[in-house]
Amino acid sequence: MRASSGGTAVRLARLSRHCDERFLFVPMDHSVGDGPIVAASRFNALVRTAAEGGADAVVVHKGRAASIDPALLRSCSLIVHLSASTAHAPDVDAKVLVGDVEEAIRLGADAVSVHVNIGSDTESRQLADLGSVAEACRRWNVPLLAMVYPRGRRIADPHDPLLLAHVVNVAADLGADLVKTTWSAPLERMAEVVASCPIPVLTAGGPSDRGVDPAAFAAGVMAAGCAGLAVGRAFFESGSPARVIRALSAVVHQAPAGTHDGSLTTDGLSPIQPVPVR
């Protein structure tokens, strides 16, 4: 991880609860894009499951952040997501800023995140937004997670390793501290993406194919040298969220890659749904 100064370094350290510079984030911001992920009365329980299972941070929008019981964040960091679009928009790839760094700080955030779709019709505006948020993060000493995807009608293969190397370096060059992107095909070529990038690379939760074992996918990601994963739907849409998050945490934060419960897919887990990664 490249050197960070002052409060940014302190907050980055909080984002890896095991102090190993590895990260397991749980995005739970999907209600803006696609609708509620769980009944309102159960949201705090879902955050508790993520935190107690070993997640390093949850990612939510500012309004939802204000509703989380602060006691649940004693061992789990808060990342406030600043970008949004909905599934009903004329262009679902057109992300816009809906919050700022100062708001996130007032909410107690340890970091903020911004989404950029490289290859989309509004790429230029999204890049400008990333740059402006990065400047504010430096001013306030807040880490920035850039979620950068090759996505849009100009993208022929979003899992091309060369293309992924390009998009993660866009994040690094514009000032992000961490970058999340999609996975390469084949997965082992994520090693090339990681080697190209001066900041830690996290991979999105994995393919939506029926029967995919999230922990087996995570093991492949970590073996390729990634710094961690951001796993949302494979967690909260599963039949056993607690079991999923524990298995993923074991893969991300401990010993040899591939150490996980191989029975995961046969113990009540619903298959990952075929929806876009956000």
Image (cartoon, rainbow, N blue to C red):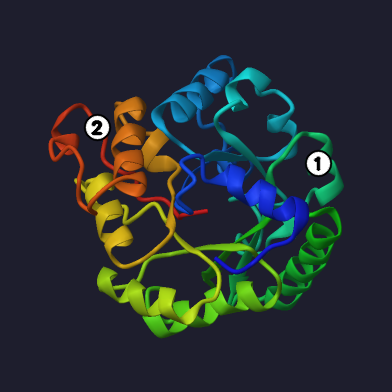
- The local secondary structure at tag 1 comes to helix
Label 1 sits on residue: 105
The numbered mark, 1 or 2, whose residue comes first in the sequence reads 1
Name which residue type carries label 2.
Leu
x, y percentage for residue 204? 43, 56
Observer-nearest of 28 and 203: 203
Name which quarter of the figure residue 70 lies in: top right
Count of residue discs: 2
Residue 189 seen in the current view: yes
Quadrant into which the N terminus falls: bottom right
Name which residue type carries label 1.
Ile
x, y percentage for residue 14? 60, 42
- The local secondary structure at tag 2 comes to loop
Observer-nearest of 12 and 111: 12
Label 2 sits on residue: 269
The answer to whether residue 107 is above or below residue 92 is above
Q: Is residue 266 left or right of residue 90?
A: left
x, y percentage for residue 8? 72, 54
Name which quarter of the figure residue 109 lies in: top right
Q: Is residue 185 left or right of residue 65?
A: left
What residue is at 27 percent from the left and 63 percent from the top? 223
Q: Nearer the viewer, mark 1 or mark 2?
A: 1
Gap between marks 1 and 2 measured at Cα: 36 Å
Structural crowding at the residue carrying mark 1, measured as other residues with C-alpha within 10 Å and reported as few (<14), some (14–19) or many (≥20): some
x, y percentage for residue 118? 59, 75
